[in-house]
Amino acid sequence: MDSKEYDRWMSMARRTIESAKHDAEVGDYNWACFKAHQAAEFAIKAALYGIGRATRGHSLTHLIAGLSRFINVPSEVINLCKLLDKFYVTTRYVDAWSEGVPYEYFTRTDAETAIKTAEDIITFIEDLWRRLSSGGRS
């Protein structure tokens, strides 16, 4: 178990979710949604790096599947990852939409949902890490 690497990635997850909240407060809803995805990605990678399974990629669905090879991941968490994955491209790329620009398509509700979803994933990872660190299995 690599607690130092886990802490490094988890620190970034926590900072990024706070940045997402700030973006939501000022109306940058597309960026709040994207950063929620990023925060969840950092958290999942924290667990993977922490158990010695360094990984690459940005799909939360695939990252959580990689984690589930070693640890029991509830289907609810897998579904949260699938929801956030929908915010990875469309929030940032103008050509993800046939017309308009990304910020026109995202709402406060989208941002609040994305942030809550990411927080749930972060909480799952933090709880998981506490169990693993104390010698328990998931």
Image (tube, rainbow, N blue to C red):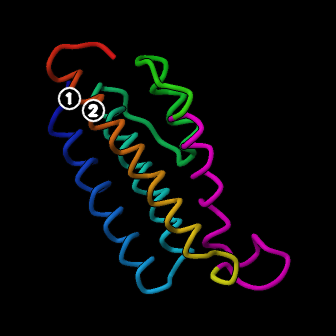
The quarter of the displayed image where residue 91 is located: bottom right
The quarter of the displayed image where residue 51 is located: top left
- Residue 58 disc label: none
> Which residue occupies 55% across, 75% down?
108
Find residue 28 and report its horizontal and vertical position in percent. 50, 82
Of residues 126 and 94, the one drawn nearer to the viewer in this rendering: 126
Above or below, 102 relative to 15: below
Mark 1: amino acid: Arg
> Which residue occupies 20% across, 24% down?
1
The residues tagged by marks 1 and 2 sit, at their Cα atoms, a distance apart of 5 Å
- Say which residue label 1 marks: 130
Determine whether label 1 and label 2 are within 8 Å by CB: yes
The magenta-colored residue range is 77-102
**Kind of element beneath mark 1:** helix
> Which residue occupies 48% across, 18% down?
69
Q: Is residue 85 magenta-colored?
A: yes
Q: Residues within 10 Å of mark 2 (few under 14, many from 20)?
A: few
**Kind of element beneath mark 2:** helix
